[in-house]
């Protein structure tokens, strides 16, 4: 079958995605590996030893499969010797995961069904021997492919170059028979093991009276092993999916092969260890939670260390003063009353300083409110237009709006609309994505601004199938305060309770014939939780 390279842009994008996912998955799995080797509590537990062996094996397989993919895209042919070594370890690591899952299922079966023998049967040394046996059982069949190649081809083939994939190098009938026999045997054993252990653990869970939770958790763990096995089986299903899809959509050959490669070789390397690692509380605490706590502690340490140094300096100065005071006390015992009065004065100063700090904090909050109010007043004549197609306003946005607003809203016809200036708001993210930026304009009179907003609310505007929204322009401080009531307003809307939001951020909720005002979103949510659902009309 003839093959051709993808265009440079497509090849670069695919390699970027594959390498990027490889680095990301390596980082995630590396967290679990780092947590395992950092804490000795995992060294004596066979379950975690088998789990971390699964993670490390997936890391090795991920590195090999990404390397082979990049080589296949950049170098069409590769030396047979180098290729055979890469395929040897790639094949070995790809077959290890199912057997490792079977070992983990057996360990859980022994822990639940034979707890008295678990320590003896599942020792650390036996776990290491099991891991070595798993590698041996997968390395020998992979090595057999090279011997079959030597039987069918002259030894000089190792000095030639081929496309580095299994079909190109190991495409004989003997290789196919070897692959089918070994994979069928191993997978059958793994499936039978998972079914057997699940049934046994299920029986133990039904019969358990004292440790029902532990048995149920073990049953769910073995089910999780079955899910992980299904992820491993994606690599075997991928050729059939490729055959079916390529027959239907031959024009999309490159995209189909790339998509099935990601789903069968890359994503399972993330999902399989991640699902198990996040589900296990101990591994989650030692890997994810501990890393987060360490970062938080580092930040707190960086914040507190300078202040602790200041406190130590103040303590040193205080010690010197106390030493001088003690010397004076030794000479002049009559000065005790004077010293006590000075101490009382210092305490008063400290209390007054605390009060001053609280007053300053209140003053700062009041100043922030005044600044936000000042900014809102400067913006009181501004209107934001959201969703308007980029460039529709032409070179002169002011003239475009003065001409278009009466057309959009007939109720404004005859009104004097004086627009001072109008422009698009710069948004780097929207520019990169090609999205429409918000258009903001300023009118001369506040009444004009209110008339436009009322008209936009009564007469929703749609241009070219796209809804255009008109909104007032507030400061960031006011926007954040109003946004805090989003959950409360959603609850009120769902319960059919009438409400409205006053400037700058006061939510009024109807209670009977009156409205209650809330300055805090938490208070509003607590109040709404006490109101039963209603079929009344909800404000839009």
Image (cartoon, rainbow, N blue to C red):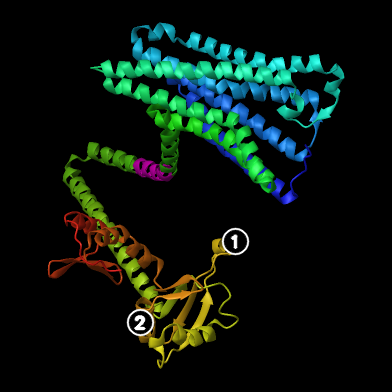
Residue 416: x, y in percent? 42, 92
Task: State the quadrant of the C terminus.
Answer: bottom left
Within 10 Å of disc 2 (Cα), the crowding (few <14, some 14-19, many 20+) is some
- Looking at the image, residue 120 sits to the left or right of residue 494; the answer is right
Which residue is at the front of the view, 369 or 540?
A: 540
Residue 57: x, y in percent? 58, 24
> Which residues lie in the magenta part?
303-317
Task: State the quadrant of the N terminus.
Answer: top right
Q: Which residue is mark 2?
A: 450
Q: Is residue 312 magenta?
A: yes
Q: Which residue shows up at 41% across the image and 83% down it? A: 409
Which residue is at the front of the view, 274 or 95?
A: 95
Q: Report helix, strand or loop for mark 2.
A: helix
User: Residue lying farthest front?
Assistant: 248
Q: Which residue is mark 1?
A: 432
Q: Which tag, 1 or 2, sits closer to the chain's start?
A: 1
- Looking at the image, residue 282 sits to the left or right of residue 135; the answer is left
- Is 310 placed above or below 188 here? below
User: Residue lying farthest left?
Assistant: 513
Residue 85: x, y in percent? 73, 22
Residue 45 seen anywhere in this rendered image of the structure: no
């Amino acid at each position: 079958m003839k093959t051709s390279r993808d265009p440079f842009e497509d090849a670069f994008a695919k390699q970027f995605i594959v390498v990027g996912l490889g680095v990301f998955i390596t980082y995630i799995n590396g967290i679990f590996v780092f947590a395992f080797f950092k804490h000795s509590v995992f060294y004596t537990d066979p379950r975690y030893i088998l789990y971390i062996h699964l993670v490390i094996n997936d890391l090795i397989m991920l590195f090999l499969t990404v390397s082979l993919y990049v080589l296949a895209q950049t170098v069409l042919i590769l030396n047979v010797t180098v290729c055979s070594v890469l395929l040897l370890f790639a094949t070995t690591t790809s077959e290890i995961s199912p057997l490792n899952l079977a070992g983990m299922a057996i360990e859980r079966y022994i822990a639940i069904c034979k707890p008295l023998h678990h320590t003896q049967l599942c020792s650390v040394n036996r776990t290491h021997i099991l891991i070595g046996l798993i590698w041996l059982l997968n390395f020998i069949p992979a090595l057999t492919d090279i011997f079959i190649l030597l039987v069918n081809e002259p030894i000089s083939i190792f000095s030639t170059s081929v496309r580095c994939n299994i079909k190109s190098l190991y495409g004989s009938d003997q290789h196919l028979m070897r692959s089918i026999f070994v994979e069928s045997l191993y997978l059958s054993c793994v499936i039978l093991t998972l079914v057997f252990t699940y049934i046994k653990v299920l029986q133990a869970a039904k019969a358990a009276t004292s440790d029902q939770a532990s048995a149920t958790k073990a049953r769910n763990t073995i089910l999780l092993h079955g899910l992980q096995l299904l992820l491993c089986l994606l690599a075997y299903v991928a050729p059939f999916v490729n055959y079916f899809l390529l027959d239907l959509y031959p024009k999309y050959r490159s995209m189909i092969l790339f998509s099935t490669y990601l789903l069968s070789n890359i994503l399972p390397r993330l999902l399989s260890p991640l699902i198990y690692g996040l589900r296990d509380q101990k591994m989650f605490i030692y890997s994810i939670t501990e890393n987060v706590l360490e970062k938080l502690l580092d930040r707190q340490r960086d914040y507190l260390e300078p202040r602790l140094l200041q406190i130590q300096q103040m303590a040193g100065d205080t010690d010197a003063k106390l030493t001088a005071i003690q010397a004076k006390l030794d000479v002049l015992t009559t000065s005790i009353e004077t010293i006590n009065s000075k101490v009382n004065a210092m305490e008063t100063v400290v209390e007054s300083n605390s009060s001053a700090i609280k007053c300053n904090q209140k003053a700062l909050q009041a100043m922030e409110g005044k600044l936000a109010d000042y900014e809102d007043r400067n913006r009181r004549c501004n209107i934001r237009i959201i969703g308007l197609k980029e460039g529709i306003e032409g070179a002169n946005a002011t003239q475009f709006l003065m001409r278009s607003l009466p057309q959009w809203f007939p109720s404004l016809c005859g009104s004097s609309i004086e627009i001072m200036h109008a422009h698009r708001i710069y948004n780097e993210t929207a520019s990169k994505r090609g999205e429409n930026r918000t258009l903001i304009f300023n009118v001369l009179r506040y009444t004009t601004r209110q008339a436009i907003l009322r008209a936009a609310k009564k007469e929703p505007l749609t241009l070219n199938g796209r809804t255009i929204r008109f909104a007032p322009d507030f400061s960031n401080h006011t926007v954040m305060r109003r946004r805090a009531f989003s959950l409360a307003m959603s609850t009120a809307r769902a319960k059919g309770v009438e409400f409205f939001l006053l400037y700058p951020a006061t939510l009024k909720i109807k209670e009977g014939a009156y409205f209650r005002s809330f300055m805090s979103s938490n208070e509003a949510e607590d109040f709404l939780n006490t109101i039963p659902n209603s079929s009344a009309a909800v404000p839009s």
